[in-house]
Amino acid sequence: MTGQTPRLEIRNLTRRFEGRAVVDHVSLSILPGQVTCLLGPSGCGKSTTLRMIAGVENQDAGEILVDGAVICDSHTHVPAEHRRIGLMFQDFALFPHLSVADNVAFGLTGPAAERRARVETMLDRVNLRRFIDAWPHELSGGEQQRVALARALAPGPRIMLMDEPFSGLDNRLRDEIRDTTLAVLKDSGTAVLLVTHEPDEAMRMADDIALMRDGKIVQQGAPYNIYNAPVDREAVAFFSDVN
Ligand code: ADP
Ligand code: MG
């Protein structure tokens, strides 16, 4: 152990729907600049876990800590907008009626000049500064995705939750946006919890993999450890697709 305080830690996070625990005592921790991939079949509770961390879904039990401070437990509930946690979904479209600059500035507060400077910095990071005054429809799909990434990161989230964010893209675009995402996130020390159903994506992006089944984490560790000793048949099948 390094002794470093995790950027994100969840302890025994639990959510019940109609008496059934769809997220059942899930515990995880992620260090700054690290990526944990959450893998598991449809319906096992991945999105609900992310939504509780983001603060857009209530938890029934458990604790969420950011940089060692409790943001949610039975006594505390920091609202979503004060958590500095970014959430990125598969269909995170840009606002079509706003310019690229205004899209990236959307979540920002403060004086106009500071917001503009932040927008320029973020667009530099995804190599799209030249499009600052363009409209979303003037950009390719991959460029739009990079602008959306810049927008998600502009407010400086401490944690980024990504729910199959690259699913809608073709392979070439996906590789490109994955690499950009990883570079930008690592650079900013943001902790990432990434849900994916792509074995290659998990092997390539993760520092840590957590396998989820039926609301529970059943195995967690470095990608190659999990790849070499998968816990169940489902995991064996999943990793057999890695090339
Ligand atoms: P995943 O993202 O892994 O596919 P989800 O977290 O979306 O899984 O859902 C986990 C389980 O919780 C599913 O069985 C789903 O039907 C159920 N569920 C999710 N949200 C609700 C809700 N608001 N009310 C009732 N059941 C829900
Ligand atoms: Mg889901």
Image (tube, rainbow, N blue to C red):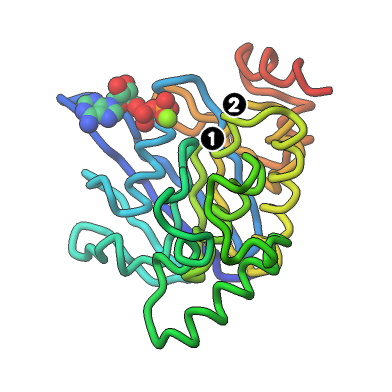
The circle drawn on residue 57 is none
Q: Quadrant of residue 165?
A: top right
Tag 2: amino acid: His
Question: What separation in Å lies between label 2 and label 1 (alpha carbons)?
Answer: 7 Å
Residue drawn at x 51%, y 55% as measured from the top left? 160
Do the residues under discs 2 and 1 have CB atoms within 8 angstroms?
Answer: yes
Image quadrant holding the N terminus, namely bottom right
Q: Reading the chain from its start, which is encountered first: label 2 or label 1? A: 1
**How many numbered marks appear?**
2
Taking 12 as reference, is 135 left or right? right
Q: Nearer the viewer, mark 2 or mark 1?
A: 1
Pointer 2: what residue? 197
**168 and 56: which one is in front?**
168
Residue that mark 1 sits on: 164
| Residue 116 x/y as whole percent | 52, 79
Query: Residue 227 at what x, y percent from top left?
Result: 75, 28
User: Residue 165 vs residue 169: left or right?
Assistant: left
